[in-house]
Image: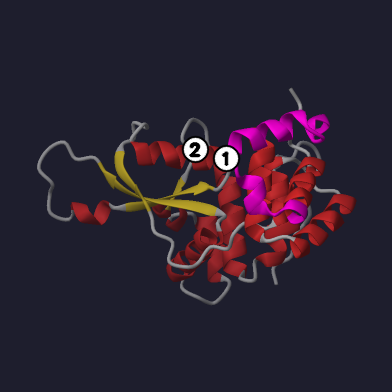
Amino acid sequence: MKGFSGFPAGKVHFTPLPNLFFSELLPAIDDLAELKVTLHIFWLLHQKKGYPRYVSRRELEADGVLRGGLREMGQEPGECLGQALERAVARGVLLHVMAQPLVLGPRDQGQEDERDDWYFMNTDLGRRTLDKIRRGELELEAVVTPGEVRLEVERPNIFVLYEQNIGLLTPLIAEELRDAEKAYPAGWIEEAFRIAVEHNARRWRYVRSVLERWATEGKDRAGRGAEKDRRRYIEGKYAEYIEH
């Protein structure tokens, strides 16, 4: 094992990581190569400027630091990298698109080999960028198409929904979320969060109230008369949870 001399005195640069990485991703990642590649991509993206920000497969393959770290695992770095990227995409951490350089004239023989893979972090900005790519609204130096995920991606659990739509978890809220996840179907929970966002009611109390009402009155019954139902949320007993 190679020793580490410690972090130097004075100014040290940092790479930020979302708290959700430590509360949800780190406990779930069970492959060391996937963890190394995921953290390395966080680091690379933090150093990039401009828009859109992504890392390419070729960039990763040429990265001596990353290759060295993967080689230490006793596996061929290229193969190890490919498997790690596939796992990270399947897990939902990375968004993958396939890129082919734009060719203005006749395509030369061998240009098919210039195809590359681009990876975006699965953040709100990354998802919006991918939507623009799908709609052809971004002027890029390549023909880009979304890649296919070959493994099943799990639906976001209640902790992910909370941090994406409301804010940072606290131990007390986490306990309430665990209870709610056991009590209500996953589809209900996702829809309740969506309703809270639509009504600018980004509070757990509001989401919980929606779930409790569905459990009491029946979701199908509560769903009839959508406009009336929306007004009921805004003007009824849940109005105190909504920011106008």
- Residue 241 lies within the magenta run: yes
Point out residue 235 in the picture as x, y percentages from the top left corner.
75, 28
Q: How many marks?
A: 2
> Picture quarter containing residue 72?
bottom right
Report the amino acid beneath label 2: Arg
Q: Is residue 17 among the parts visible in the rendering?
A: no
For the residues bearing labels 2 and 1, Cβ distance under 8 angstroms: yes
At 57% from the left edge and 64% from the top edge, which residue is drawn? 34
- Is-magenta flag for residue 233? yes
Local SS, label 1: helix
Local crowd size for mark 1, using a 10 Å CA cut-off: few (<14), some (14–19), many (≥20)? few
Q: x, y percentage for residue 160? A: 68, 52
Q: Is residue 214 left or right of residue 41?
A: right
Spatial separation of the CA atoms under disc 2 and disc 1:
6 Å
Q: Which residues are magenta?
A: 215-242
- Residue at the spot of label 2: 128
- Please tell me whether the stretch drawn in magenta is mainly helix, strand or loop: helix
Residue 124 marker: 1
Q: Residue at x 67, y 47 (%)?
A: 222
Q: Farthest residue toward the left? A: 106
Quadrant placement of the N terminus: bottom right
Residue sitting at 68 percent across and 46 percent down?
192
Question: Is residue 196 visible in this depiction of the protein?
Answer: yes
